[in-house]
Image: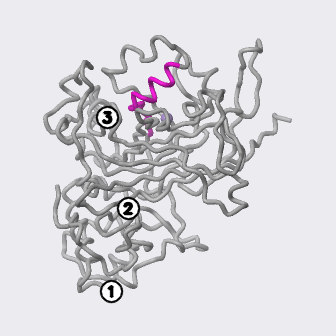
Amino acid sequence: MIDATHDPELRSWVASANDAQTDFPIQNLPFGSFRRRGTEEPHRIGVAIGDQVLDLRLASECAAWPEDVARALAPLAAGDLNAFMAMGQKTRADLRRALSAALAEGSTQQRTLRECLVPQADAVMALPCRIGDYTDFYISVHHATTIGKQFRPDNPLLPNYKWVPIGYHGRASSIQPSGQAFHRPMGQIKTPDTDAPELGPSGRLDYELEMGIIVAASNSQGQPVPIGHAEEHVFGLTLFNDWSARDIQGWEYQPLGPFLSKNFASTLSPWIVTMEALAPFRCAFSRPEGDPQPLPYLDSRENREAGAIDVQLEVWIQTEAMRHAGHAGDLLSMSNLADAYWNVAQLVAHHTVNGCNLNPGDLLGTGTLSGPKPEQAASLMELTANGKQPLKLSNGEERRFLNDGDSIILRGYCQRAGQRRIGFGECRGTVLPARDSHFV
Ligand code: MN
């Protein structure tokens, strides 16, 4: 999977792509959906390069491409990333090589493609693709253990955890792109000292640092995807914030799991970093000594050798007061996707083992990606011990859960000696006050 497109020495004629700090060097080439700021034009598919977007509609129309590349560009030029994702892994890898060559220093296409760049500052990003279905998993054993302890101190992990990748079906309609805001949800809340629930705004609003796995190719209903082919069905990864109302969740979640505590809003980062771009950052997947090995349908030699992906993750908070003071925000925690108990191929193999069909654009959330150390917790529920120990912020404010006006910013990047660092951009969402006519 490693080829000339990953060469750390490769440079682009787009100068900002050669900046050591950029998330989008020529080795990355993630896909997103955008329109020019201030226009109502249909969304276009673009590839991020440095601080620019290569407009693939313009690139398809203006530059000369070999026939197979032109075929791959056709759905992208039409604004349909889902159709491109469905064309399969070989098409994806071929287009990556063509775009890499075209954007590399010395390319003969430089003069034409220069006219197809849009500054990211002038682009408004949408969701990168149409999301059909959304499933949320629970793959951090550290998150599952910390949350479990709050309910069952002596027996935090349920007996199925180390055998089944736990998940539930979420709702796709309320997933929004980075940069948007949402209203604090209303819901039924019952506190331990009241006899009956009341309708009110959530007082325990939280974030969840997750990654989103974007499905590329479908499988037919009734046709499981074997683990050895699972990643052929994955287009790439994004950052994902699964906003959660802990008070609504606590009252509603038994016996069927989360419902209105989760489906009022989720935020997705705008750029899908492809599995091809992530190839240099693979790492071994293993189970701690004494834990059960995954069942054979969730296990393979390849998966043990390179099933995990080293993605460093960060959560930042910028409160309203910080925003007014021009303060960029505080880092709340850092963790890594590679510390999860299950990996991408296992989630696809498990999701389809019963014959469930996945479609291009389906989103699989990883679940809250907390690391092994307490300071690597990826939600406030963990960082504040369910609101009991407030966090002190650098400007003197305190948080147990989120306040109105708070923005949460997720960041992610891959870096490794001998490789060019690549990043995911940011996933930013902001809490607005509750809005409800029932509540006074
Ligand atoms: Mn979640």
Please give the residue where the numbered disc 1 appears in the rendered image: 112
Dot 3 or dot 1, earlier in sequence: 1
Amino acid type of the residue tagged 3 in the rendering: Leu
Q: Seen in the image, is 223 located left or right of residue 159?
A: left
Which amino acid type is shown beneath numbered disc 2? Phe
Pick whichever of labels 2 and 3 is earlier in the sequence: 2
The type of residue carrying mark 1 is Thr
Q: Which residue is mark 3?
A: 347
Q: Is residue 209 magenta?
A: no
Q: Nearer the viewer, residue 408 or 120?
A: 408
Q: CA distance from mark 2 to mark 1?
A: 20 Å
| 195, above or below 210, in the image | above
The image position of residue 362, as x and y in percent, is 39, 44
The answer to whether residue 138 is magenta is yes
Query: What colour scheme does the image use?
Result: one colour
Instruction: Judge by depth and name the residue closer to the eye, 50 or 62.
Output: 50
- Alpha carbons under labels 2 and 3: distance apart: 23 Å
Q: Could you classify mark 3 by the number of other residues whose Cα lies within 10 Å: few (under 14), some (14-19), or many (20 or more)? A: many
> Crowding near pointer 1: few (<14 within 10 Å), some, many (20+)?
some
> Depth check: 104 or 58 in front?
104
Which residue is found at the position 49% from the left and 25% from the top?
A: 146
Q: Is residue 205 rendered to the left or right of residue 216?
A: right
SS for dot 1: helix
Question: Where does the image place residue 196, in percent across and percent down from the top left?
Answer: 76, 15
| Magenta highlight range | 134-149
Q: Quadrant of residue 434?
A: top right
Count of number-bearing discs: 3
